[in-house]
Structures are given as C-alpha cells and as structure tokens.
Image: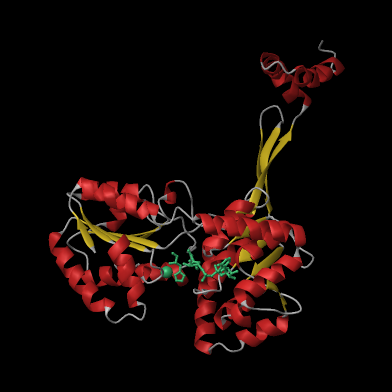
Amino acid sequence: MRIIEDDRDYREFIKIIRDRSEDFGIDVLEDSKIIIEHVKKSGDFAVELYTNRYDRFQNNTFKVSQETIEEYAGKTERSFLDALSKSIERIRHFHEKQVERSWKFKDALGVELGQIIRPLERVGVYVPGGKAAYPSSVLMNVIPAQIAGVKEIALCVPFPDGQVNPYVMAAVKAVGVTEVYAIGGAQAIAAMAYGTQTIKKVDKIVGPGNAYVAAAKKMVFGTVDIDIIAGPSEILIAADETAEAAFIAADLLSQAEHDENASSILVTTSRELVGKVQAELTERIEKLSRKEIVQHSLENYGAIIMAADTTEMFDRVNEIAPEHLEIMTKAPERDVELVKNAGAVFLGKWSAEPLGDYSAGPNHVLPTNGTARFFSPLGVYDFIKRTSLINFTEAGFKDIASAVEAMAGYEGLDAHAESVAVRKRALGEI
Ligand SMILES: NC(=O)c1ccc[n+]([C@@H]2O[C@H](COP(=O)([O-])OP(=O)(O)OC[C@H]3O[C@@H](n4cnc5c(N)ncnc54)[C@H](O)[C@@H]3O)[C@@H](O)[C@H]2O)c1
Ligand SMILES: N[C@H](CO)Cc1c[nH]c[nH+]1
Ligand SMILES: [Zn+2]
C-alpha cells in the first residue's frame, strides 16, 4: 500500500480512485444499448436469445417455479438458515424505524396542507449471479421494499449454465419473494423496465450488478426509477495511536477482497501505527483465498494517508466521502461529529465493517466513489413516493387569492389568473 505524506501525492491518489469506476467503456455501453432496444422491441424472444448467448441457458420459460426455489433452498445448511434468520430479524427491525407516515396540518383559516405517503406498486430487484452471488444483498434490497408496503416484487437472477447459487435461493425463500426470473444482465433490466410477454413492467429497479447491469440501469432511468449505482466496495479507517493494528488490517482486507477495484484506505495521525498495520497486512494477506484480488486492489487503490492532526484527518475523510468509514480513535463518539460525508460510519473497535454487511441491521447498499456527498444508503424511503395534499376553505381562498392573481399576472399567465378570478366572481368579490 502506498504511503501518502504530502498534498501532491494525496491529490494524485484522489484522481486515481475517482477514475476507477466512473467509466463503463464504449463496448459495454453499445452492447447494453443494443440489448435494451432488442428487448423493448421483441420481448421474451430477445430475453431468451441473450440468456442463451451469455448464460448458456435455454428453457421453455425463464420464470422460476416455486419447486425450483424450494429445491435450491433445500440444499443449504441449517447453520446458514439460522444466520439468515438472525440477519433478517435485525435488518427488519432497523428498517422499520425508517417508515414515513403521511402528515397534514390545518392553519387558522381551516386550510389543510399535507403530504401523502404511498408505496411504489411494483419493484424489480436485480440479484447478481455471475462471479459474485450474495444472499445478503437479497435481504438488503427486498426487506426495505416490503416494509415500505410494495405489493409486487419481481426478482431477476441469472442462472449461468442453468444453475443458481442455493444460498441466494434460500434468501429469496426466507424473505418470501415468489416472482423470480432466471435472467441477468442488460436483458433482465430491459425486461423489467419495458415489460415482456412474461414479465410485467416495474416502477423501480434496484440491486447491484456488473458493468452491463449498471449501464442498462442508467439507460432505463426515466422510464423507471433506479437506486444508486453502487460501485466497487470501499473502506476508510480513521485511526490514531490508540487503535489496534490487527483490527485495522483485518477490516481493510475485508473490503479489498470484494473486487480488484475495491479501495481500502487508512488515514492516521500515528506513524507508529503505520508500521504495525503494514506488518499485520503482510502476514494476513498470505492466508486469504482471494489473495490475488486483494493484492491488486491494495496496490492500485489502497493507501495509508498521514494526517497532521484530527482536523486534517476528517478533512480527508469528508473529501473522500467513503462508502464505509470506521473511526478508531480515542473518542469516536466525539469525532463522528466531524463527519460530513460517508455511507455508513462504524464507531470504535467492536464495530467491524462486516457486521454491517450482514447482520447489524442498516443497509449494505451504500453510496460509493464520493457519492456519499449527496446519496444516502438504500432504505424504506427509496420505495415510497410523496404526494402533496391541498384542501382550501373559502376563507383560506380569499386570503391568498389576490397574491395568486398578482403572481400569475407578473408571469403573463392569464388563464392562471382567471382560475382565481372566476371564484372571486362567484363569491361576489369582483
Ligand atoms: N455493491 C454491492 O453491494 C454489491 C453486491 C453484490 C455484487 N456487487 C457487484 O456486482 C457485480 C456482479 O457481477 P457478475 O458479473 O458476477 O454478475 P451479474 O449478474 O451482474 O452479471 C451477469 C450477467 O452479465 C451479462 N453479461 C456477461 N458478459 C456479457 C457480455 N460480454 N455482454 C453482455 N452481457 C454480458 C450476462 O447476461 C449475465 O447474466 C460485481 O461487480 C460485484 O462487485 C456489488
Ligand atoms: N461490502 C459490500 C458492499 O460494499 C456488501 C457485501 C455483501 N457481502 C459482503 N459484503
Ligand atoms: Zn463486504
């Protein structure tokens, strides 16, 4: 891992990590566009064609039967199902706190104003099924939608060579999703966005995926809503001399193993800690099954950044705006006040980032690549919409009628003004 001591190296590093996931590449963009257009025009026929081409899977239907879900789920161990239940319980509990209720108020003239909250009607969840298959991502995408009150959830997961990860199917069964399609890539996104003979179109598509999936999601945005595009995983640990090097190294490696493009960063005020963390990393990397991926990500997108003091440490944190931020300082509960931008913050040495990936409760779909400056974690609020409520009394109307007429006049919109004037005349005011 590079060590960054001065501002010039720091600026160069920021550019490197920002560039790593912003571009899909022209081939991916073109291919995704062609697939989307084809599915839009030819429906199931095109979905089957691309499923056959990229997943080498042909069937008389891509709708997954309940028996198939049960069959795969039945292959998983009791210990996995117990862990799954524990995670589901905690994720539900956390997300229930996010529920927003409709509200309204009445002013002195009896005018009622408010906001009506309604769930989205139908949502599509994409579950990746190529190289990385995460049952935890099924929970994180489905549970908030269910808590929001979404009635219909369609789930697409590719079956490469006709097979799917049994743990993913056990998670699907555990959360009670029954509408499942064995399709992936841009064809799955297009099928959910535009509908086909088999799949009814959805209102919103959520869930991570590879470059084809992400590019397709961006392209169908507007026809449907989409969630944040979560890029390669990131962790930033802000630590001082009191932190434990072994914990820091273990947590940096936890995100580095996700992806060659993952980014693991330590920002510290302690030189002594740097040596200890480096030694721990060297020893621990050797034992990892995904050693090559980890080495690639640490060499290219990893860094130890030296900070002069706590203020500089959190200036760096806020500029990088990491997906996951761990604070391992003398007073993490005080220092969290300095955090402006981060997807999720983990305080103190017992709040290991992987707790948040699986079972703590908060969502693990988080903004990456600096987008924590303006995006939030996936949550119940992503599956609702708000409608404004306006209910005027005669007295309330009289109170603002002239102001509205004047505004309409200044905007040159006669018909707007007349909508008020016709009522004023009915009241005998003109
Ligand atoms: N951020 C998160 O929370 C999170 C969680 C899980 C996975 N992920 C990410 O999701 C991604 C999963 O990718 P994956 O590939 O394993 O699964 P995937 O399901 O996203 O992609 C597989 C599909 O890609 C399509 N495809 C493959 N090659 C193609 C080609 N040449 N042309 C057109 N389409 C093609 C196929 O249709 C296939 O079904 C990884 O990058 C992983 O890091 C992120
Ligand atoms: N850390 C990932 C998001 O960056 C989520 C995940 C799933 N499984 C393990 N981890
Ligand atoms: Zn993870």
Residue 171 in picture, x, y percent from top left: 58, 77
Q: In percent of the image, x 36 and y 81: which residue is there?
A: 289
Answer with the quadrant where ligand 2 appears in the image: bottom left
**Residue 98: in sight, yes or no?**
no
Residue 167, compared with residue 416, is above or below; it is below
In-front residue for pair 23/346: 23
Q: Is residue 276 left or right of residue 250?
A: left
Q: How many marks?
A: 0
Q: In percent of the image, x 64 and y 57: which residue is there?
A: 34
Residue 241 in picture, x, y percent from top left: 17, 61
Residue 353 in picture, x, y percent from top left: 37, 67
In-front residue for pair 238/57: 57
Quadrant where the image shows the C terminus: top right
Q: In percent of the image, x 15 and y 67: which residue is there?
A: 275
Q: Is residue 80 left or right of residue 46?
A: left
Residue 173, compared with residue 366, is above or below; it is below
Residue 246, compared with residue 265, is above or below; it is below
Residue 391, picture quadrant? top right
Q: In percent of the image, x 66 and y 14: which residue is there?
A: 410
Q: Is residue 128 left or right of residue 197?
A: left
Q: Residue furthest top?
A: 430
Residue 364 in picture, x, y percent from top left: 47, 64
Q: Residue furthest left?
A: 272
In-front residue for pair 129/305: 129
**Residue 413: in sight, yes or no?**
yes
